[in-house]
Image (spheres, rainbow, N blue to C red):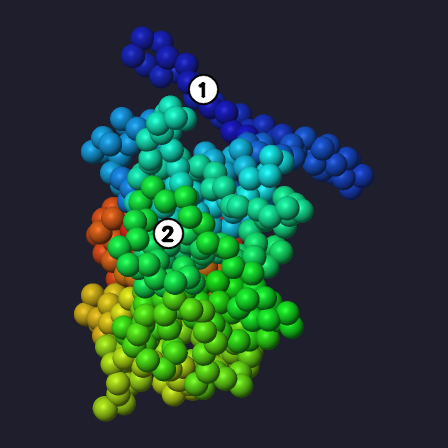
Amino acid sequence: MILGYMVFTGNTMLKTQRIVLGISRSYTAKAKRIVLAQDKTKIKEYSPKTTDNHEHRVYVWGFQETGALGIQTNVKKAKERYTEMVHHPTRLQFSNNNEITDVAAGYGFTAYAVKRDDGETLFGSGLNTDSQLGFQVKGNPNDPANLDVIIYPTAIKLPRVQGETDEDMRVKNMSAGRAHLVVLTQNGTIFTLGNNSYGQCGRSIIEEERYSKSALIHRISQEDICGKEDEVVQVECGQDHSMFLTKKGRVYTCGWGADGQTGQGNYHTAGQITLIGGDIEKEKIVRLSCSSDCVLALNEAGDAFGWGNSEYGQLDDSELAETQINIPRALKLTKSLGKIKDVAAGGSFCMALNDQGLVYTWGFGILGFGPFVEQTSKPQHLLPPLFGRNDFSNETTVVSIGCGVFHMGAVNSDGDLFMWGKNRFGHLGLGHKKDQFFPFKTAINGKVTKVAYGVDHTIALCKSFF
């Protein structure tokens, strides 16, 4: 260490002296180890505090005015203009107090599968104009007022037969269409609610049937659909039709068929649930996807099949291709993608995910390739760095895909959700209403396990990071 000082007398410097001090500290090897050990013990371990002990948490965003997000508890506030949209993922308070196991998003409404001690297994919020969330009333029991809009998740009473337990009524799978809801319970019973104008609820069409203020919940046994030797494992709703996938890989459909989306070989409406064939007749189908009127199916070998609307070449890119396909057909345009492990069908576009974790999109719309690419008849893959892969995380890959009518999403192996597409109602969760032309990460405080894509809102089922 160097110290210096100067002595002044008046304006004259009399003396300057520099003193050099040598200061050093020596440690033995043992002493060093002791010091390091002492420092290590001073490191505090961080144990984050969680607000609840439920396995899942739910985040919601998009158009709020319909009540589909279920985050308002005050009717007056729900009608205020500044609450019309929620642009960022927002924690659903209902999920803090309830164990939510599954979610489904329809056109302006949401259904929640819950696990509770009081026996309630299904809740809903949003539009209820066609009683798609059951018969909901308030006020005087003798003269109740029907609720067409439900702003906070409310129990949907599923009718039980004698001997059915709470466990029997737990939701196994569910899906929502434009104005109908299909629910599959653990004991194999299917419940359909809402609009049946085209037979999408799997029952006979009644002319001029009134769906508002209706307490009718149609109950179907899976034996009536696929017999005693098989069981229903997935239900999937399009805009106005329904599909049922069984354990043996067979597909049954009903509802609106003007674009061939029922796959029954015609363009008629069908209130009778019917087994479909075509190219999937001898295949074991393991996945169905539809958000409007175009359907994609996946077999256990990783081959894709499709039927329904193909106006933008989603199902066939040949020169003389049909624009409506009314029977399941093996897709030739996906043969070069390798083994496919997930598919998603939007309003005018399709998506596929192969076993290498590559995401492919095709059709018409915002496909993820920028503002100047709005249509392609052949599947094109989006680069892995768009979904979080980089030099520091080179094993990150996409594990699931999904879409609504106008927007798409993908979840990677880190539990991050990336979204792109139309964003008029803020349903991409990016903090604005501008369309997003490339996949962009949505800020969610949790690992995403499932996403329900509505027409104007999005629901994400997540697990805690810790």
Which one is in front, 390 or 418? 418
Residue ranking furthest to the right: 30
**Residue 239 visible at all:** no
Q: Which residue is mark 2?
A: 194
Give the left or right position of residue 348, taking residue 398 as reference: left
Mark 1 and mark 2: Cα distance apart in space? 92 Å
Left or right of 92, for residue 130? left
Where 97 falls versus 5 (above or below)? below
Whether residue 228 is situated above or below residue 418 in the rendered picture: below
Q: Amino acid at mark 1?
A: Tyr
**Residue in front for this viewpoint, 395 or 357:** 357
| Residue for point 67% across, 47% down | 163
User: Between 236 and 212, which is closer to the camera in this rendering?
Assistant: 212
Q: Against 281, is 465 above or below?
A: above
Task: Determine which residue is flagged by label 1.
Answer: 5
Residue beneath the point at 37% across and 73% down? 262
Q: Which image quarter holds the N terminus?
A: top right
Question: Percent from the top left, x then y, of residue 347?
Answer: 29, 66
Of the numbered discs in the image, which one, if any, rests on residue 213?
none
Mark 1, other Cα within 10 Å: few <14 / some 14–19 / many ≥20: few
Type of residue at label 2?
A: Gly
Image x and y of residue 101, in percent? 55, 48
Mark 1: which secondary structure?
Answer: strand
Q: Quadrant of residue 144?
A: top left
Viewer-closest of 108 and 204: 204
Query: Does residue 129 lie above or below 82 as drawn?
Result: below
Q: Is residue 180 visible?
A: yes
**Nearer the N terminus, badge 1 or badge 2?**
1
**Quarter of the image where one finds residue 15:** top left
In x, y percent, where is residue 254? 40, 68
- Specify whether 98 is left or right of 175: right
Residue drawn 60% across the image and 39% down it: 119
